[in-house]
Amino acid sequence: KYMGHEFSMPKLPFCTFYGGQRITWLCAYAMIPCVIAMTLLGKKSYEWLFKNKKSEDKIWILTLCYLPIILFVMIFFNPKWGSGTTNLLGIHRYIFCSPFIFVFLYQMVSKPQTYRLKHFIFVFVLCNVVFLTMWHYTNIQKFIFYNFITALVLAYMYHSINKRSWVVMAICAFNLLIQVSLFNQFMHAIFTE
């Protein structure tokens, strides 16, 4: 009641009432695994209901349920403080700091998979639809800022069949460097600016 958590229809653009551009960026990236999990959960539900195909991995099914539930709670039960639009209140805290994200990432990258053009288009379109809900495409710099990690994901997908490739190693090394840099900024209280 006091935090404004009551059911209401979402109002675009999504925002956060604290932090700056990078917190909004993190919230946008936290929404992407939720949407993918929702799609995969729909596929698993269809297979279970109409093809009587059961999944043996219960943790994976729990993960596919957890991520969309957090997305729905953040979109439909959050306040509209400040700008009058739906506040995501740090959805990244509930996604990236949960053990379910590790199950999700493991399932996504553990098996070598050959991606087709439709997979690349799907990832690019999905990311940009989520970014559009934040309405942060006011200039080319923001477009590049938001799609930088999308480009890394697409590069990883392109080289995923050969996990020992120097490109995959470079992407992972760059990711580690970014993590260390962001952690250092967090420790110096400059993370949200």
Image (spheres, rainbow, N blue to C red):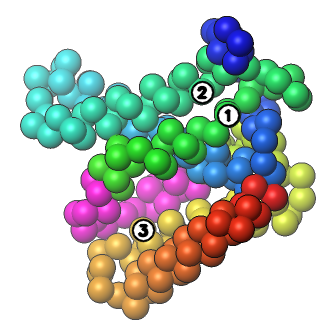
Q: Establish if 177 lies above or below 108.
A: below
Q: Position of residue 142 (x, y in %)?
A: 81, 60
**Pointer 3 local density, CA inside 10 Å: few below 14, some 14–19, many at least 20:** many
Q: Establish if 111 lies above or below 24.
A: below
Q: Which mark is residue 89?
A: 1
Q: Secondary structure at mark 1?
A: loop
Residue positioned 67% across, 33% down in the render: 88
Q: Nearer the viewer, residue 75 or 155?
A: 75
Q: Nearer the viewer, residue 186 or 84?
A: 186
**Pointer 1 local density, CA inside 10 Å: few below 14, some 14–19, many at least 20:** many
Magenta residues, dominant SS class: helix
Q: Establish if 167 lies above or below 66.
A: below
Residue positioned 30% across, 86% down in the render: 164
Q: Establish if 66 lies above or below 147.
A: above
State left or right for residue 112 relative to residue 12.
left
Residue 146: say if magenta.
no
Q: Position of residue 42 (x, y in %)?
A: 35, 28
Task: Mark 2 or mark 1: name the one nearer the start of the chain.
Answer: 2
Q: Secondary structure at mark 3?
A: helix
Q: Position of residue 176 (x, y in %)?
A: 49, 76
State left or right for residue 6 relative to residue 69.
right
Query: What amino acid does circle 2 point to?
Result: Met
Query: What amino acid does circle 3 point to?
Result: Met
Residue 92, located in which quarter of the rendered image? top right
**Which residues are drawn in magenta?**
106-125
| Residue position for label 2 | 74
* CB-based contact (under 8 Å), mark 2 and mark 1: yes
Residue 91, located in which quarter of the rendered image? top right
